[in-house]
Image (cartoon, rainbow, N blue to C red):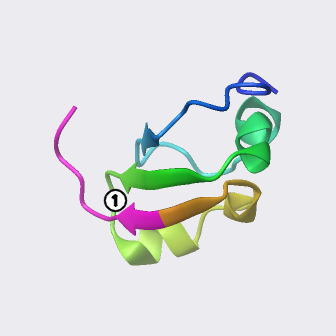
């Protein structure tokens, strides 16, 4: 629960190396972020196990920024 209690998080950038979202991201389920920026494709995102643990408003695929 690394992000538990972090209510000010507005965005998170997730690399394509992530294949499963578990306890390290679990604290994010208590906050609704504005944006998740994912470095991979929509198909890759859909293959991630446990992604429903992150609540967000929008997702940006193929993100290349910081």
Q: If the image is split into quadrants, where does the N terminus sit?
A: top right
Q: What element carries label 1?
A: loop
Taking the spot 71% from the left edge, 26% from the top edge, the residue there is 3
Residue, x 41% and y 65% (percent of image)? 59
Q: In this view, does 24 lie above or below 29?
A: above
Query: From the viewer's perspective, is residue 9 above or below residue 5?
Result: below
Q: Mark 1 points at which residue?
A: 40
Residue 63 is one of the magenta-drawn residues: yes
**Left or right: 3 as drawn, with respect to 47:** right
Magenta stretch: dominant secondary structure: loop
| In-front residue for pair 33/52 | 33
Q: Pick out the residue farthest to the front.
A: 8
Q: Position of residue 44 (x, y in %)?
A: 45, 68
Residue 25: percent from the left, percent from the top? Answer: 70, 37
Residue 46 horizontal/vertical position (percent): 55, 74
The answer to whether residue 62 is left or right of residue 54 is left
The x and y percentages for residue 20 are 68, 50
Q: Which residue is drawn at 44% across and 42% down?
A: 11
Magenta part of the chain: 58-66
* Residue 57 vertical position relative to residue 65 in the rendered view, above or below: below
């Amino acid at each position: 629960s690394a992000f538990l209690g972090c209510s000010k998080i507005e965005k998170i950038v997730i690399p394509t190396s992530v294949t499963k979202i578990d306890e390290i991201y679990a604290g994010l389920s208590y906050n609704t972020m504005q944006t998740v920026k994912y470095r991979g494709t929509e198909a890759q995102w859909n293959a991630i196990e446990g992604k429903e643990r992150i609540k967000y408003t929008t997702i940006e695929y193929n993100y290349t920024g910081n």
